[in-house]
């Protein structure tokens, strides 16, 4: 009996080692190998060369990086942002690559029907194959210290905008698949903050958890027609994070965008860059008491930097 039990333990140990090895190899494949591959031909073949991509929050940071990379792959673009001057500069820059670029200047914190009907009107006469919801804002404070107008603004930008743009654009993406036979794609940008309870940035984390819970089910609902990716990066060197970046996990928006595009059509969720995936893995094994202490301390320091920028 003891020999049988020992043999069973040995078998279970071998199975556990094999499972761990497979997990490591799959992680390396996703986060180390795929982002180093050229993505243009794959994306053009999968979604339709010369089709259109709509990007919210497109004039800065990650949204701008998505626009620049997709323009190089030959996709036409609809760029949505609140600052026309920045949109016009980016439109001129990308137009030099021989693609078509349309812009929509809109304050996406205004969740009235007028805001979204303007975006829909610009997209109705084209072959829309990809939607990237990239707009977002954050704040690092204890919850009682978050100004009430900031609270409403964060919910409008991070929750309402992504939910309504997704709902508004889905029929156009589905029409693309019916009309062309190619797949469509939806990429919603969340955050690693939405995957953990995060003291000091609890409101932003709650908003990004909403994005993840909205997005992942759509991958199953529309699995025959659409590729859906819930993208959860960490810190990038953007205007939103200037002065607050923990150097060890900070990457450029270009690195994040390229990694995300390497995963769309292959995965439903992704942290994109290997640094961000490694951070998520480390956070998941930390005891919650230690993790909360680190998160709160880091968030409050970032909040001090935010206040200094606004002063």
Image: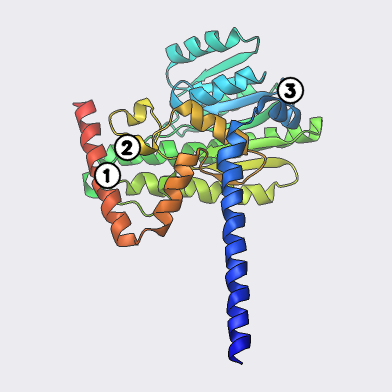
Looking at the image, do the residues carrying marks 2 and 1 touch, with CB atoms under 8 Å apart?
yes
Q: Position of residue 53 (x, y in %)?
A: 63, 26
Label 3 crowd bin: few (<14), some (14–19), many (20+), radius 10 Å: some
Q: CA distance from mark 3 to mark 1?
A: 44 Å
Q: Position of residue 170 (x, y in %)?
A: 65, 37
Q: Position of residue 31 (x, y in %)?
A: 55, 41
Residue 17 in the image: above or below residue 117: below
What secondary structure is marked by label 1? helix
Q: Which residue is mark 2?
A: 246
Q: CA distance from mark 3 to mark 2?
A: 38 Å
Q: Position of residue 110 (x, y in %)?
A: 43, 31
In the image, which disc is placed on residue 92? none
Q: Quadrant of residue 167?
A: top right
Residue at far front of view: 3
Q: Quadrant of residue 79?
A: top right
Q: In percent of the image, x 22 and y 48: which residue is there?
A: 144
Query: Depth-wise, is mark 3 or mark 2 nearer the camera?
Result: 2
* Dot 3 or dot 1, earlier in sequence: 3
Looking at the image, do the residues carrying marks 3 and 2 touch, with CB atoms under 8 Å apart?
no
Q: In percent of the image, x 20 and y 36: which residue is there?
A: 304
The answer to which of 132 and 287 lies nearer the viewer is 287
Q: Which residue is mark 1?
A: 298
Q: CA distance from mark 2 to mark 1?
A: 9 Å
Residue 14 in the image: above or below residue 30: below
The answer to which of 41 and 11 lies nearer the viewer is 11
Residue at far bottom of view: 1
* Dot 2 or dot 1, earlier in sequence: 2
Q: Which residue is mark 3?
A: 49
User: What is the number of callouts on the image?
Assistant: 3
């Amino acid at each position: 009996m003891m020999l049988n039990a020992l043999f069973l333990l040995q078998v279970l140990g071998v199975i556990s080692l094999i499972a761990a090895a497979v997990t490591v190899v799959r992680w390396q494949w996703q986060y180390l190998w795929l982002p180093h591959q050229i993505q243009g031909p794959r994306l053009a073949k999968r979604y339709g060369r010369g089709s259109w991509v709509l990007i919210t929050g497109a004039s800065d940071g990650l949204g701008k990086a998505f626009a620049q990379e997709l323009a190089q792959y030959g996709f036409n673009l609809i760029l949505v942002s609140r600052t026309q001057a920045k949109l016009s500069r980016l439109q001129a820059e990308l137009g030099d690559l021989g693609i078509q670029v349309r812009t929509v200047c809109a304050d996406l914190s205004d969740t009235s029907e007028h805001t979204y009907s303007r975006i829909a009107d610009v997209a109705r006469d084209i072959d829309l194959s990809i939607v990237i919801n990239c707009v977002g804002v954050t704040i690092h404070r204890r919850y009682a210290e978050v100004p009430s107008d900031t609270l409403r603004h964060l919910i409008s930008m991070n929750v309402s905008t992504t939910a309504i743009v997704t709902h508004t654009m889905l029929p156009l993406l589905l029409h693309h698949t019916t009309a062309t036979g190619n797949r469509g794609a939806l990429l919603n940008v969340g955050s690693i903050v939405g995957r953990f309870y995060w003291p000091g940035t609890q409101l932003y984390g709650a908003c990004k958890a909403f994005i993840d819970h909205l997005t992942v089910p759509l991958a199953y609902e529309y699995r025959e027609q659409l590729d859906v990716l819930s993208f959860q990066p960490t810190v990038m060197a953007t205007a939103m994070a200037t002065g607050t970046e923990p150097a060890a996990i900070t990457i450029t928006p270009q690195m994040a965008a390229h990694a995300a595009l390497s995963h769309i059509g292959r995965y439903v969720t992704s942290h994109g860059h290997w640094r961000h995936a490694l951070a998520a893995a480390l956070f998941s094994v930390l005891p919650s008491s230690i993790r909360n202490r680190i998160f709160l301390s880091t968030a409050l320091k970032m909040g001090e930097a935010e206040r200094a920028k606004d002063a």
